Amino acid sequence: MTEKHICGECGGHRLVPFAGESLPLRGAEAVTGLSGMRCADCGEIVLDAESQERFAQAGNALVLARRDEQQRELARIRRKLRLTQHQAAQLTGGGHNAFGRYERGEARPLPAVMNLFKILDAHPELLHEIQK
């Protein structure tokens, strides 16, 4: 193999082509029909340009879908608790427009905010404990 075929992970020189393989996306279906090179020493893969683009697009679509889901979930729970966006923002220590931005997808809530609202979704009776 030529110098350009050195594994970036282990420095090995035994890169072999592969085609038609599937790679999983965390929490989603695998992206199929991918091609590239695989290091025979450590298993590291380098996708070709077309496969890399398709894999990146699938990952981006997954991120956007999860953000949309998170926005809807936050709005649903807030309404279930009968809180205004302003009250929800006060509850979590955010600015007065924070929940509007979360629900419109203009800002991402901190994981602590999502966790709090998931707990309150399962145990709405705890809301009065936090509002004291």
Image: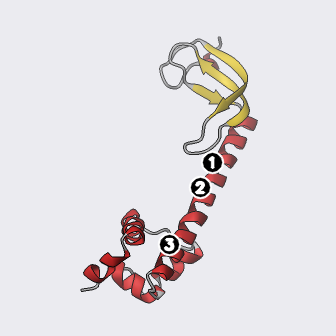
Foreground tag (3 vs 1)? 3
Mark 2 or 3, nearer chain start: 2
For marks 1 and 2, give the CA distance: 6 Å
Residue type, label 2: Val
Residue 115's x, y, as percent? 38, 64
Residue 22's x, y, as percent? 67, 30
Residue 34 in which image quadrant: top right
Residue 114 in which image quadrant: bottom left
Question: How many C-alpha atoms fall within 10 Å of the one at disc 1: few (<14), some, or many (≥20)?
Answer: some
The residue that label 1 is drawn on is: 59
Nearer the observer, 49 or 75: 75
Foreground tag (2 vs 3)? 3
Q: Residue at x 55, y 76 (%)?
A: 103
Q: Is disc 3 placed on a helix, strand or loop?
A: helix
Residue type, label 1: Gly
The residue that label 3 is drawn on is: 74
Mark 1 and mark 2 residues within 8 Å of each other at the beta carbon:
yes
Left or right of residue 8, residue 52 in this image: right
Q: Which label number is shown at residue 17?
A: none
For marks 3 and 1, give the CA distance: 23 Å
Question: Taking 71 as reference, is 28 above or below it?
Answer: above
Residue type, label 3: Leu
Residue 117's x, y, as percent? 41, 71
Residue 110 in which image quadrant: bottom left
Question: Taking 3 as reference, is 34 above or below it?
Answer: below
Question: How many C-alpha atoms fall within 10 Å of the one at disc 2: few (<14), some, or many (≥20)?
Answer: few
